Image (tube, helix red, strand yellow):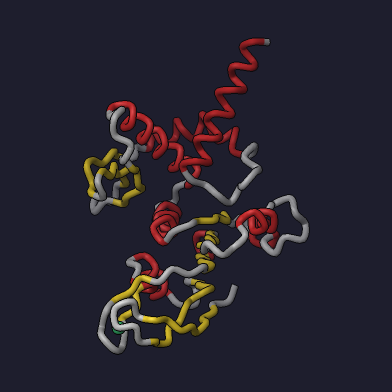
Amino acid sequence: MKGKVVKDKFICPHCHEEFEIKKHVVINVDEDAQLKKDVCNQDLFTYACPHCGTNSNIDYALWYEEPEKKLLVHLIDEEENVDQLIEQMDIDNPYSPFKAFYDNGYAIRLVESHDELVEKIAIFNFGYDDRIIELYKLMVWMRTTMENPNDDTYEVLFMPGEDKQCYIGIIHDHSLENGVLITEDIYNSIKNDYSPYFCDVYEERPVVNKERMLYLLTDINNDDNHNKMN
Ligand SMILES: [Zn+2]
């Protein structure tokens, strides 16, 4: 996809003056490498008011394409019809505008926040499969919540470390509490155990997050129980 910028008006929440903003609704990092940096450090979504200097973080829907990593991520906004989008993105839909991307081996993902977009970019840039990383995160999250049964505020996040290693960060009260090193052994064992099931994840395929993986694990367990009963 070719990059696309649209202009919009924004009213500063601090001084209530209106100013013009540019939204990068389609980003192709092959055309502009700086955009990738601006997405990852969230500068792209931070706008300084020309009247009072207050910074505002503005959410908007966008497409992010990184051809080298064969990655296409759509950051949705709340006005979009997600069911309709998912239908359009269905790999079995011959009229899907994304068919050419699928045919070229792209991973196509839907995300709901800037943080999720940045996380996806980081996962693919490290050459990992986000389905395996999301399962790994889910397992760390389940263990953490079992160890802390009276506290449901734990979150987990993929985190590249400065030592070229990657971690599953355990976030508590918005700060990093611990990091679990992602080892090749565990990564490969999750891959071996679960990737045969990935082809069954046809519903909401572009959504790969904790809920999706929880659903997958539940499905596998139910199947196992069913098989045991027969
Ligand atoms: Zn202002």
**Residue depicted at x 64% and y 39%:** 199
- Height in image: 131 above or below 43? above
- Height in image: 112 above or below 32? above
Specify the quadrant of the image occupied by residue 116. bottom left
**Residue depicted at x 22% and y 42%:** 177
- Left or right, 25 with respect to 44, comes to right
Residue 173 at x, y percent in the picture: 24, 46
- Height in image: 154 above or below 66? above
Nearest the viewer among 126 and 8 is 8
- Left or right, 158 with respect to 110, comes to left
**Residue depicted at x 58% and y 76%:** 2
Specify the quadrant of the image occupied by residue 182. top left
Q: Quadrant of the N terminus?
A: bottom right
Q: Can you tell me which quadrant of the image ligand 1 is in?
A: bottom left
**Residue depicted at x 43% and y 68%:** 59
- Height in image: 114 above or below 31? above
Q: Quadrant of the C terminus?
A: top right
Residue 98 at x, y percent in the picture: 67, 61
- Left or right, 21 with respect to 143, comes to right
Residue 78 at x, y percent in the picture: 52, 62
Residue 58 at x, y percent in the picture: 40, 71
